[in-house]
Image (tube, rainbow, N blue to C red):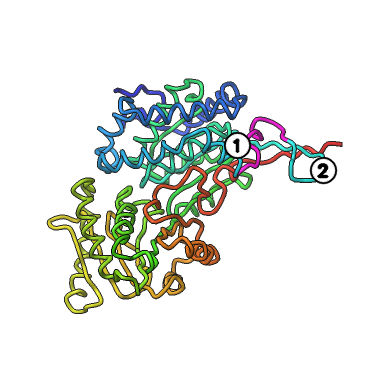
Amino acid sequence: MNLPNYFLADLPPEATLSPALLGEACLTLKRNREQYLAARSTDQLVRILCEVAREWLRAESPFRRLALTEGPAMTGFPRTTLERGLNHFFQQFTRENFHALLAQDLGDPRCLDGLCPSANEAGCSRSAMAVGPEFLVHVTAGNLPNPTLMSMTLGLLTRSAQFVKCASGASFLPRLFAHSIYDADRKLGACLELAEWRGGQAALEEVLFAEADCITGTGSDETLAAIRARLPLNTRFLGYGHRVSFGFVAGEVLRDGSSRKVVEAAAEDVVAWNQLGCLSPHVIYVQSGGVVSPEQFAESLAEELEKREAAEPRGELSVASGATIAARRGIYEVRAAHSPETRLWQSKGSTAWTVVFEADPRFQASCLHRFVYVKPAKDLTEVLHNADAVRGKISTVGLAAAEDKAAELARQLARWGVTRVCPLGRMQNPPLTWRHDGRPSLGDLVTWMDWEKS
């Protein structure tokens, strides 16, 4: 399948983007939005998005085949990782899930279509309508594709013309998604534009920033601060910065009969997207006192990662990333040789996976690519005390605990500042209704018009 040149990202690498070209693209997007998108109903848009998702889930889909055959070379993820990640993402695209998202974030799924009466204010004769940005710009990171695909989806629901600025080398899957939307509805696809360039090209970015009503940014905290400093005062900015995640395994679930499932769940979170997203665990904390000790858990996790590597290989790494893992392994090899409080398990002849058991309970950032720490803890209170250095930066905690204790643990995590708690094994598979960084992803994009009737 050869993709036609519908988007700037389809141009050959030698093509040069200019401020004038971007300015014309912005004006075209706004005209197309007014003509083809602004009057669409929510039900129409949801139906098209669900059709697009069904196409991506078909084994015969040309977009899926291209993603799985050329994706490994273009993205660095092996076929099995891409297949699993894309399946999890597009399986969320159902009418029921979209309506749940609309109801959760906006109250009434119809309020993007027109004025809706307020049902919660007794004696108040008021209606309201949610209005999306006319022109929405996404400045995306290049580590994972799904956040970019979700940003594009939300922008369509808000009837926004969208320009997606992809990180250098990261436009392949967003391009395919845009083409699949164009294939399902050409007029809807004409309200999207994608381009790819290295950050810091001020002349190009100033054009986008000047035209945009709202900008979303994903990346490092430094990148987001640099974008925010350059925006006009009346431009809304939604930034999603650096976050980390960890797992917590309560002692009561580590029994001989059930510990294997917990280990498999932990391995699932380490393997998903090669541990590269903000939702991936750096550390798995294991409560001491269970039938299975934290050290035994680490050894079992290493065995499971070895099995996963045979079935779902991590794939090749850059020389720099491989050197980082080798250097980190070297540190723990020395420590393990001199102290029983440190142990190391690693793939033989490669950097495919690494498990470090360390008695020191302080949170430790992993170098990712299936490199994970296992640390013992007396209880969750001790975990949070030792993770204080990253308080406010935790995205997700994967929890394995008895049902009668899980709710209290979740409340404790919420009070500490964690914005998402999920079962271990589902950390990299959030629902469509996930509140990114604790904020309503769809609700943050809209503004409200209240009509107070006489």
Image point (24%, 74%), residue name: 342
Within 10 angstroms of label 2, few (less than 14), some, or many (20 or more) residues? few
Which of the image's four quarters has the N terminus? Answer: top left
- Please determine whether, in this image, residue 277 is positioned above or below residue 134: below
Element on which disc 1 rests:
loop
Name which residue type carries label 1.
Pro
Q: What residue sits right under mark 1 in the picture? A: 133
Which quadrant of the structure image shows residue 386? bottom left
Range shown magenta:
105-116
Q: SS of the residue at dot 2?
A: loop
Q: Residue at x 29, y 29 (%)?
A: 65
* Residue at 35%, 61% in the rendered image: 282
**Relative horizontal placement of residue 419, taking residue 275 as reference (left or right):** right
Instruction: Identify the residue under disc 2.
Output: 124
Q: Is residue 333 above or below residue 122?
A: below
User: Residue extending furthest right?
Assistant: 454
Of the two numbered discs 1 and 2 on the same chain, state the one appearing first in sequence. Answer: 2
- List x then y, in percent, for residue 228: 53, 51
**Residue 239 on image: x %, y %:** 51, 50
Residue 134 picture quarter: top right
Amino acid type at image mark 2: Cys
Magenta region includes residue 112: yes
| Residue 281: mark | none
Relative depth, front residue between 188 and 139: 188
Mark 1 and mark 2: span between their CA atoms?
28 Å
Residue 370 picture location, percent across and down = 27, 55
